[in-house]
Image (cartoon, helix red, strand yellow):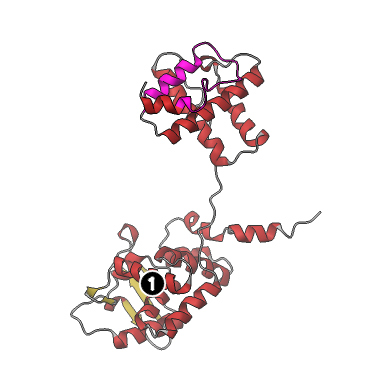
């Protein structure tokens, strides 16, 4: 056994299964399993902990010594419920234990010590996907205020486009002059190279039209069709992210392009009575399920609603 693997096992003492009745070869199997893989010390500790926890459960419910070669699917399913409901462990902790067992049983299967992997049929717990976070209204106001105070006309045009169209950074840097159509009453912008090569047209509300028009009036007279120009030519993805980092430092909170896309989506649904179809069209989503993520409550909103429950 390699020194690192041996040390990972021995960190648990002379016997990983101390205090637990096990079959004679159980510790030897676990040692061989660890030695056969290039696990990090952290992974070794996690696997040892998970297998020990399963062994303790096995002894309690079956009233026999822990023997991995005698484990069943029912044992693994019961262990999952035990971890979640009796021990009250998190979804991530329970799922990690199932992964550890699956790896261990796979090795036993490869050695011919068992005929099937009893953990293979046991599904991991599903973790609820929380809604993507966006900036609060107060944060957006602070951002736009800091831009105005610095008379940063280009930044105002860029951030206004993000916040009013929910565009991706790739949409913005590839935007050309002929893609922007504006007049006093209306306006739109065409993103010709969206995700998957798709093209879409987004409306430009008055606030965004004013910000973009103001920038176009002072835009450097360069030989380029790109709307936004940087210090050394066309503005790039890197330049956009540098601008976001600059205003992150100024405002005191993190700002990045996709966060602004999330912000627009949240605000749009809040102000349009959850018009998912319209938002999907603006964001370029083919599947409403993708757009529907934004209609879910965020963690802070869920906590606020939960506080209202009384008995």
Task: Tell me the crowding category of disc 1: few under 14, some 14 to 19, or many 20 or more residues within 10 angstroms, Cα based.
Answer: few
Instruction: Please state the horizontal and vertical placement of residue 278, each as a whole percent of the image.
Output: 48, 67
| Badge count | 1
The furthest residue to the right = 311
Q: Is residue 31 magenta?
A: yes
In this view, 163 is above or below 50:
below
Q: Which residue is mark 1?
A: 246
Instruction: Please state the horizontal and vertical placement of residue 53, each as a whole percent of the image.
Output: 58, 27
Looking at the image, residue 29 sits to the left or right of residue 269; the answer is left
Looking at the image, residue 205 sits to the left or right of residue 86; the answer is left
Secondary structure beneath label 1: helix
Instruction: Please state the horizontal and vertical placement of residue 114, each as a whole percent of the image.
Output: 46, 15
Instruction: Please state the horizontal and vertical placement of residue 183, each as a whole percent of the image.
Output: 38, 86
* Residue at the image point whose x is 53% and y is 29% from the top: 50
Q: Quadrant of the N terminus?
A: top left
Task: Identify the magenta region.
Answer: 9-37
Question: Could you say which is closer to the camera, residue 175 or residue 78?
Answer: 78
- Residue 155 occupies which quadrant of the picture? bottom left
Question: Could you say which is closer to the camera, residue 92 or residue 5?
Answer: 5
- Residue 271 occupies which quadrant of the picture? bottom right
Can you see residue 116? no
Q: Is residue 287 magenta?
A: no
Question: Could you say which is closer to the camera, residue 138 or residue 274?
Answer: 138
Looking at the image, residue 63 sits to the left or right of residue 99; the answer is right
The furthest residue to the left = 223
* Residue at the image point whose x is 35% and y is 24% from the top: 2
* Residue at the image point whose x is 31% and y is 88% from the top: 217
* Residue at the image point whose x is 52% and y is 70% from the top: 268
The furthest residue to the top = 24
In this view, 217 is above or below 274:
below
Can you see residue 308? yes
- Residue 261 occupies which quadrant of the picture? bottom left
């Amino acid at each position: 056994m390699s020194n690192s693997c041996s040390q990972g096992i021995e960190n648990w003492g002379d016997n990983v299964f101390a205090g637990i009745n096990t079959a004679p070869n159980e510790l030897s199997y676990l040692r061989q399993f660890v030695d056969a893989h290039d696990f990090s010390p952290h992974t070794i500790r996690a696997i040892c902990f998970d297998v020990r926890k399963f062994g303790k459960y096995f002894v309690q419910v079956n009233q026999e010594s822990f023997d991995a070669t005698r484990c069943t699917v029912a044992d693994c399913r019961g262990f999952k419920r035990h971890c979640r409901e009796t021990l009250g462990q998190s979804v991530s902790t329970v799922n990690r234990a199932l992964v550890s067992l699956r790896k261990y049983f796979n090795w036993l299967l490869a050695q011919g010590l068992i005929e099937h992997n009893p953990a293979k049929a046991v599904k991991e717990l599903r973790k609820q996907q929380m809604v993507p976070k966006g900036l609060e209204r107060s944060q957006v106001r602070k951002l736009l205020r800091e831009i105005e105070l610095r008379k940063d006309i280009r930044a105002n045009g860029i951030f206004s486009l993000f916040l009013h169209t929910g565009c991706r950074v790739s949409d913005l840097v590839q935007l050309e002059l002929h893609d922007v159509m504006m007049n006093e009453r209306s306006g739109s912008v065409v993103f010709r190279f969206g995700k998957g090569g798709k093209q879409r047209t987004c409306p430009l509300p008055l606030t965004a039209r004013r910000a973009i028009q103001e920038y176009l009036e002072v835009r450097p007279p360069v030989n380029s069709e790109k709307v936004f120009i940087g210090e050394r030519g066309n503005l790039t993805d890197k330049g956009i992210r540098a601008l976001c980092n600059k205003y992150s430092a100024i405002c005191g909170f993190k700002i990045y392009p996709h966060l602004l896309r999330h912000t627009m989506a949240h605000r749009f649904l809040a102000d349009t009575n959850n018009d998912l179809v319209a938002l999907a069209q603006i964001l370029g989503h083919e599947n409403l399920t993708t757009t529907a993520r934004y209609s879910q409550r965020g963690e802070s909103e869920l906590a606020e609603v939960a506080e209202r429950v009384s008995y």
